[in-house]
Image (spheres, helix red, strand yellow):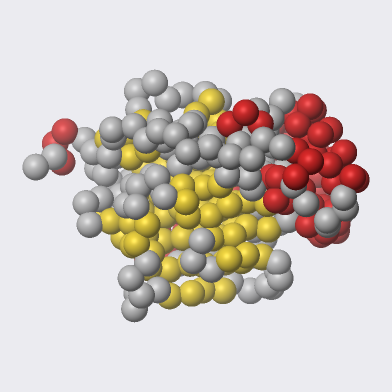
Amino acid sequence: MSRLKVLPQYLLPKRALTTFAGRVAGHKGGQYTTTLIKWFVQQYGVNMDEAANPDIASYTSFNEFFTRPLKPGVRPLAKADFVCPVDGAISQFGEIDDHQIFQAKGHQFTTTELVGGDATLAAQFQHGSFANLYLSPKDYHRLHMPCEGRLTRMIYVPGALFSVNPTTARGIPRLFARNERVVCVFESKEHGPFVLTLVGATIVGSMATVWHGIVNPPRAAEVKEWRYEDRNIVLKKGEEMGRFLLGSTIVMLFRKGTIGFNPEWAPERAVRLGEVMGNKPAAKRP
């Protein structure tokens, strides 16, 4: 049934739709823009009371509204080794089966596929842990750090632009390893290497990081990589690291024995930025 529901996505001109949506979202259309934002807030139940600027009419473009910051203090950081980096919902999480990441019933993809074919990078997470978190249209769309980390690499991987909602995840094989994505590799003094992957989707106009700015567009036809070992780019736990211009999914990878997930977490459960994602297993504590 899920495959039948997603069949139209194979036929849609996804790249053209995404380009058009990006232009509309970036357009400063005055009253037209305000009307669009008002419709969006009502349609998706966006809580503007949490926004640093709740005045809909003051946003000059849809992108400015969509990537709005929150009021200080509305997402306090839990006292945990790892905090949830986004507002959204859990798609899947758990242990990596050798190199296989569980997407949905009947669907898996490999860590090597996810990171753009770098088997050496992927090998660091063999039998490790993963978490896939979905950001719906109503959610806050800035991405934050689950723990402190020093940036070492960023990899842009071209790909498809399927939707990433739960229905699509159940219906399209290897979804998160097929879509366009930006792979951010970090090194933590306390937790070792970890990966934060921003997954693109239909009408996601662009993905951006705080150290680079907008990564796409332009959309390259080949894998691109940036190295940062010679720079000291360190982001603290809870600090902003990037944003989506229209919603999508993040996929995180951690080494074996690094994280024990919050026992209250479950697939499809809503999550909020700053809540407990997990802690270092007791056996790993000093």
Q: Position of residue 167 (x, y in %)?
A: 69, 32
Residue beneath the point at 87% across and 50% down: 30
- Residue 121 falls in which quadrant of the image? bottom left
- Tell me, yes or no, if residue 160 can be seen here: yes
- 175 or 193, which lies in front? 193
Quick one: which residue is furthest to the left in this view?
Answer: 286
- Residue 32 falls in which quadrant of the image? top right
- Tell me, yes or no, if residue 115 can be seen here: no
Looking at the rendering, in which quadrant would you find the C terminus? Answer: top left
Quick one: which residue is furthest to the bottom in this view?
Answer: 230
Compared with 274, 60 (above or below) is below
Q: Position of residue 27 (x, y in %)?
A: 83, 57
Compared with 131, 200 (above or below) is below
Residue beneath the point at 81% across and 44% down: 9
Side (left or right) of 191 relative to 240: left
Q: Position of residue 68 (x, y in %)?
A: 63, 45
